[in-house]
Image (cartoon, helix red, strand yellow):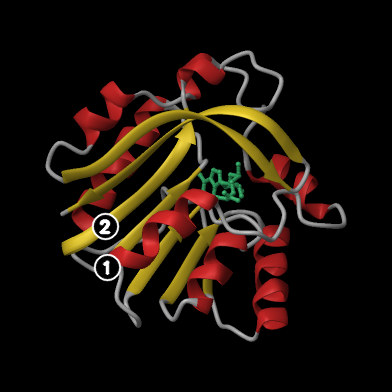
Amino acid sequence: MSTGASFWDRKYGRRGFVYGTEPSRFLVEQASGRLEAGEEVLTLGEGEGRNAVWLAGQGYAVTAVDYSRPALEKCHRLARSKGVEVRSYLSDVMDFELEDARWDAVVLLHMHLPPGKRRMLHRRIVNALRPGGHLFLEALRCDQFGRRSGGPERRELFYSAKTLRRDFQELVICRMVEEDRFIESGEHRGWTSVINLIARK
Ligand SMILES: C[S@@+](CC[C@H](N)C(=O)[O-])C[C@H]1O[C@@H](n2cnc3c(N)ncnc32)[C@H](O)[C@@H]1O
C-alpha cells in the first residue's frame, strides 16, 4: 500500500464509501460506557467519517483530522445525511496542533504510519489527553502481513503489543486485545488480524 495524501485522494475520489458508513465495531462496543455526552473527541486519520459521524450521533463533540480532501467532503456529506455536526481539519496529523490536555478521547483507527512518525504521534497523543481521558486505537497487527484481506505492503507499518505498551507506558492500559476479526466495511471483507487498545490517562 503506498501512502501519501494523493494515494488516499484517488481511493476516496471514487463513488461510494471505501470503508462503508457503518462505524467500527470495536468503537461501538467500547466507547459508550467510557465517555460522557458532550465530551470532546478527536479522531485522527478519520477518512470518510463513518466513526466521527457515529460518535457525533452519540452526543460527543467530534473533531476529525485527515489529509484527504475527498475523504472529509464525504465525512461532511455523511454527517449532513444523519443530521449531526463534525468539525474537521484538512491536515497531516503530524502538523496538526493537538494541544496539551485538550481532549477527553482520541480515536486512532487503522492509521499505519512509519515507526518513527508513529512513535512521535503516540507521544503527542499522550500529552493531548486530559487527565482521565481515553485513547481508542485499533490497527492491523504483524500477523496480517501478507494476508489478502488488506493492509500495508511493509512489515514495519504493522502494530504490535510490544510497541504499543512501550509507547503508551504513561497511560493505564484498560484493554489490549489481539484477535482475528471478520471485517466487513465497504470494499473490505475478510478475516483480519487486529490489535485494539483502550488506555486511560
Ligand atoms: C485505512 S484508512 C482508515 C480510515 C478510518 N480511520 C476508518 O477506520 O475508516 C487511513 C486514513 O488515514 C489517513 N491518513 C494516513 N496518513 C495520514 C496523515 N499523515 N495525516 C492525516 N491523515 C492520514 C488517510 O487519508 C486515510 O483516510
Looking at the image, residue 148 sits to the left or right of residue 152; the answer is: right
Q: Please, is residue 157 above or below residue 105 in the view?
A: above
Instruction: Residue at 53% x, 51% y: name it.
Output: 25
Q: Secondary structure at mark 2?
A: strand
The residue at 73%/38% (across/down) is 188
Residue 125 coordinates in the image, percent (x, y): 28, 51
Q: Which mark is residue 168?
A: none
Pointer 1 and pointer 2: residues touching (CB < 8 Å)?
A: yes
User: In the image shown, does 162 or 97 lie closer to the viewer?
Assistant: 162
Q: Split into 4 quadrants, where in the image is the N terminus?
A: top right
**Residue 115 lies in quadrant:** top left
Residue at horizontal 44%, vertical 81%?
59
- Crowd tier of the residue under label 1, counting other residues whose Cα lies within 10 Å: few below 14, some 14–19, many 20 or above: many
Amino acid bearing label 2: His
Tell me the element at label 1.
strand
Whole-percent x, y for residue 179 in the image: 45, 28
In x, y percent, where is residue 62?
45, 73
- Cα gap from disc 1 to disc 2, whole angstroms: 6 Å
Amino acid type at circle 1 is Asp
Q: Residue at point 48% right, 59% down?
A: 28
User: In the figure, 63 relative to 159: above or below?
Assistant: below
Task: Name the residue tied to disc 2.
Answer: 134
Of the image marks 1 and 2, the number of the one nearer the N terminus: 1
In the rendered image, which residue does mark 1 sit on? 104
Category of crowding for the residue at label 2, using alpha-carbon neighbours closer than 10 angstroms: few (below 14), some (14–19), many (at least 20):
many
Question: For the C terminus, which image quadrant?
Answer: bottom left
Position above or below: 103 against 56:
above
Please determine whether, in this image, residue 98 is positioned above or below residue 186: below
